[in-house]
Amino acid sequence: MFNNARKFLKPDGYLVSIHNSMTSDIDTFKPMLDNAGLEIVYHTLIDGGMGATSTARHFFLKGVMVHAVQGPLDKYVMVTKLK
């Protein structure tokens, strides 16, 4: 996914990915991101406060991106962009 991001992203585009915190962390992905020419812009655990400062972002992330995320809060979101 990270290696192909350059084909699909515009220069100012972002890649949003959701990961399981029980099996990986940000350090797991740093070498892959560097190899693909991406950098981390933002990352956080998915919880009730995510997106609280922006109604649109809150709706998109909670209503669309993580609609299927139920149960334990063991997921995190990572936002990356081209270097």
Image (cartoon, grey):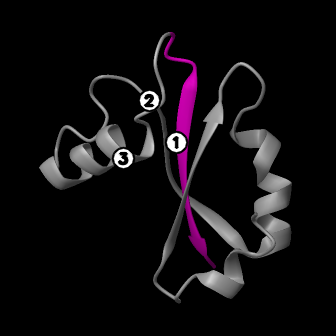
Q: CA distance from mark 1 to mark 3?
A: 13 Å
Label 2, secondary structure: give it.
loop
The span shown in magenta is: 72-83
Q: Determine the residue positioned at 64% across, 65% down.
A: 39
Type of amino acid under label 2: Ile
Type of amino acid under label 1: Val
Type of amino acid under label 3: Val
Label 3, secondary structure: give it.
helix
Nearer to me, 8 or 40: 8
Q: Quadrant of residue 75?
A: top right
Q: Which of labels 3 and 2 is toward the front? A: 3
Q: Determine the residue positioned at 54% across, 33% down.
A: 76
Residue to which mark 2 is pinned? 46
Verify whether residue 59 appears in magenta: no
For the stretch drawn in magenta, the main secondary structure is strand
Q: Quadrant of residue 21?
A: top right
Quadrant, the C terminus: bottom right
- Near mark 3 (Cα within 10 A), the count class, few <14, some 14-19 or many ≥20, is few
Q: Is residue 4 above or below residue 78?
A: below
- How many marks on residues? 3
Q: Which of labels 1 and 3 is toward the front? A: 3
Q: Residue 73 location in percent, x, y?
A: 49, 16
Residue to which mark 3 is pinned? 64
- Near mark 1 (Cα within 10 A), the count class, few <14, some 14-19 or many ≥20, is many
Q: Residue furthest front?
A: 68
